[in-house]
Image (cartoon, rainbow, N blue to C red):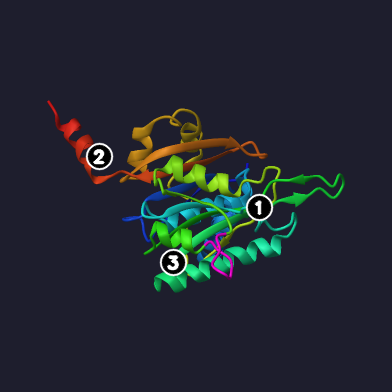
């Protein structure tokens, strides 16, 4: 019987474990050969293995992690739309992309300070078989910087300064479920074509060297079955964090792969829990 190990691969959505607001943990079995790989090779292959075994679009999960890593509750959530006079023709993705590029350039010139953003243009497309037009061009954006509501509105205009559409604005909700749902909504492909762009200098989620000995195969099985809804179990495993989603799935090889998503416990909440345990 081949000896197998359980790999724990952490993805830190922030600067480090002490300050990161979100943490994701992949738990899955690996072979003896993968366990014996050099430190450099092991770190290089760790994320690829987790992504390969996780039954989900890799790009979507990476986008969600980028959002969690880089944006705070000070960020703006925006939808830029077009009025009829300035609406690009269906299928004119180049023009739609140029409109956003010009908008962010105007915004930078206006505020004269760094701005970080991710943008997902959603296009109006023409079905090549039926000729049917679906969707209407617009942009989903998460943006953070020293900008005001007036700045965000004023930048969405043409070269003559005329408004080219409406801007819907709200503040970012940094709760795990809200941040994840927003990011997934922005990039999930339904009927309409989408792609995402980002500003330069955004932090990448950090993936430290994996640990192949922290979990046994038996404990992986228990975590995937008995402890899925056990908050105390996961909080003891990852102090300072509380689980928001534990997703066990069976791989094609008949072994478990768990994706644990956790968010940092606020300091006030930590104190309440500690005081509750100390009560007679």
Q: Which residue is mark 2?
A: 269
Residue 217 location (% of width, % of height): 51, 39
On screen, residue 70 above or below 129: below
| Cβ–Cβ under 8 Å for marks 3 and 2 | no
**In the rendered structure, which disc, 1 or 3, sits on the residue that comes first in sequence?**
1
Q: Which residue is mark 3?
A: 115
Q: Which residue is mark 1?
A: 84
Residue at (61, 64) in percent of width and height: 99
Q: Indicate left or right for 235 with 83 as reference.
A: left
Quarter occupied by residue 28: top right
Q: Secondary structure at mark 3?
A: strand
Residue sitting at the far top: 280
Front one among 220 and 15: 15
Regarding residue 200, the answer to whether it shows in the image is no
Question: In the rendered image, which quarter contains the N terminus?
Answer: top right
Q: Which residues are magenta?
A: 156-163
Residue at (56, 50) in percent of width and height: 61
Mark 3 surroundings: few (<14), some (14-19) or many (≥20) residues within 10 A: some
Q: Secondary structure at mark 1?
A: loop
């Amino acid at each position: 019987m081949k000896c197998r190990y359980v790999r724990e691969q952490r993805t830190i959505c922030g600067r480090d474990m002490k300050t990161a607001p979100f943490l994701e943990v992949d738990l899955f079995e690996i072979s003896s050969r993968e366990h014996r790989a050099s430190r450099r090779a092991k770190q290089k292959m760790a994320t690829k293995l987790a992504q390969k075994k996780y039954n989900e679009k890799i790009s979507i999960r990476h986008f969600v992690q980028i959002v969690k890593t880089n944006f705070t509750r000070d960020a703006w959530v925006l939808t830029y739309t077009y009025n009829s006079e300035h609406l690009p023709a269906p299928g004119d993705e180049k023009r739609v992309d140029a409109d956003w590029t010009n908008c962010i350039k105007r915004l930078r010139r206006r505020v004269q300070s760094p701005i970080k953003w991710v943008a997902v243009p959603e296009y109006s497309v023409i079905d090549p078989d039926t000729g049917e037009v679906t969707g209407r061009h617009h942009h989903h954006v998460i943006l953070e910087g020293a900008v005001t509501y007036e700045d965000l509105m004023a930048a969405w205009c043409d070269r003559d300064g005329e408004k080219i559409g409406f801007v819907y604005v709200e503040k970012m909700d940094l709760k795990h479920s809200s941040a994840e749902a927003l990011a997934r909504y922005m990039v999930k492909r339904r009927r309409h074509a989408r792609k995402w762009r980002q500003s330069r200098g955004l932090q990448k989620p950090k993936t430290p060297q994996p640990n192949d000995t922290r979990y046994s195969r038996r404990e992986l099985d228990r975590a995937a079955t008995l402890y899925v809804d056990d908050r105390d179990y996961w909080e003891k495993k990852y102090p300072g964090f509380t689980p928001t989603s534990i997703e066990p799935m069976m791989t094609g090889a008949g072994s478990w792969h768990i994706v644990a998503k956790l968010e940092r416990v606020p300091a006030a909440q930590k104190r309440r829990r500690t005081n509750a345990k100390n009560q007679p």
